[in-house]
Image: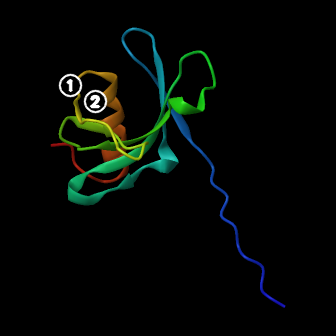
Amino acid sequence: GAAPVAQTVYNENWHWLEADNGAPYAIDLNSVRPWDRGRAEAVIYIYDGTSNPTNRKRMLFSCAGHMTDISGANGMPTIYLPPRSIGAQLSEIACTRAKIPNR
């Protein structure tokens, strides 16, 4: 008979952050991986008081002050991350875990 197919179990590892306005954000530390051209990818969750699955986003961090939502087929525009913003904090975590220096 055929050998059984091994299945990989994915365990999320959420690290929560709070924006200056109190909004909670999370980054799945196990989702972080290096990308091309010195960028890092990570899954983030923007909590709005519900468990809305559309609040889970695949983000691409430039590790140079920009972030792009790559969740959808068309992607979204790249946005600037002010240095002390929640986006910059998420970028720092993603780029550090992916071993890409922030520029």
Residue in the picture at 53% in, 22% down: 47
The image shows residue 65 at horizontal and vertical percentages of: 19, 35
The image shows residue 78 at horizontal and vertical percentages of: 24, 36
Residue in the picture at 31% in, 54% down: 99
Is disc 1 placed on a helix, strand or loop? loop
> Which of the two residues, 75 or 45, is positioned nearer the viewer here?
75
Gap between marks 2 and 1 measured at Cα: 6 Å
Residue 9 is left or right of residue 89, and the answer is: right
Quadrant of residue 89 within the rendered picture = top left
> Which of the two residues, 87 or 17, is positioned nearer the viewer here?
87
User: Are the two marked residues, 2 and 1, in contact with CB atoms closer than 8 angstroms?
Assistant: yes
Give the number of the disc on residue 83: 1
Could you tell me the amino acid type at mark 2? Ala
Q: As drawn, which residue projects farthest toward the right?
A: 1
Give the number of the disc on residue 88: 2
The image shows residue 45 at horizontal and vertical percentages of: 50, 31
Q: Quadrant of the C terminus?
A: top left
Residue 21's place in the image compared with 55, above or below, is: above
Is disc 2 placed on a helix, strand or loop? helix
